[in-house]
Image (tube, rainbow, N blue to C red):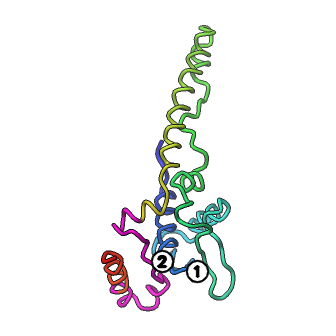
């Protein structure tokens, strides 16, 4: 099974939101600016994340998006499921039964066997994805014990100062 680009974009969006200063929503303009691509495609992804209760939409002049729950409660599986749907790698279009229809019950047994194998593989993959969460991924990424918080919205207003803000924030957390 191959995931779509929406999964990588989701990981980036959730990383931005997880590192965003609490109680300061991240503007959709900033998310779009960082990700690039189509604004309407981004809106579809954001809608899926809101429906999946991973992201909360905040309306108003200073509105935008925040995480709907703590990063440790967002599993990699919930991220995949939100944008890709339920994991089902073998679609079973019925070709085995059709091609070997005169060889029943063997065709049905073969079809069931193949389905069972892929169901087991899907279940194993789901279990691995459920064992990992956004917090764990970010702590490993930044090699810190606590996620550094910054205001990504500042990267639009003062991009030169923003780079030094990120470096200072990471250096501070690496000293702890």
Q: Residue at x 55, y 20 (%)?
A: 113
Q: Residue at x 37, y 62 (%)?
A: 140
Given residues 83 and 138, the one toward you in this image is 138
Residue highlighted by disc 1: 25
The mark total stands at 2
Question: Which tag is nearer the camera, tag 2 or tag 1?
Answer: 1
Q: Secondary structure at mark 1?
A: loop
Compute the Cα span from label 2 to label 1: 15 Å
Residue 42: image quadrant is bottom right
Span of residues in magenta: 139-164
Which percent across, then down, holds residue 25?
58, 80
Q: Secondary structure at mark 2?
A: helix
On the picture, is 73 further left or further right than 50?
left
Residue 71 highlighted magenta (yes or no): no
Residue highlighted by disc 2: 33
Counting residues from the start of the chain, the first of labels 2 and 1 encountered is 1
Which percent across, then down, holds residue 59?
69, 80
On the picture, is 169 further left or further right than 135?
left
Q: Residue furthest front?
A: 176
């Amino acid at each position: 099974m191959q995931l779509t680009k929406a999964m990588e974009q989701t990981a980036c969006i959730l990383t931005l939101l997880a590192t965003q200063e609490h109680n300061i929503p991240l503007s959709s303009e900033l998310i779009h600016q960082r990700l690039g691509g189509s604004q309407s495609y981004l809106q579809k992804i954001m809608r899926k994340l809101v429906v999946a209760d991973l992201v909360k939409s905040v309306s108003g002049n200073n509105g935008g998006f925040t995480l709907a729950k703590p990063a440790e409660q967002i599993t990699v599986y919930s991220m995949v499921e939100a944008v890709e749907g339920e994991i089902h790698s073998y679609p079973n279009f019925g070709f085995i039964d059709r091609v070997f229809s005169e060889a029943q019950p063997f065709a049905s047994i073969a079809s069931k066997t193949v389905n069972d194998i892929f169901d087991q593989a899907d279940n194993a993959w789901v279990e691995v994805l459920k064992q990992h969460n956004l917090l764990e991924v970010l702590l490993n990424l930044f090699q810190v014990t606590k996620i550094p918080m910054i205001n990504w919205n500042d990267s639009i207003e003062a991009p030169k100062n923003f780079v030094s803000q990120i470096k200072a924030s990471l250096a501070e957390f690496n000293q702890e």
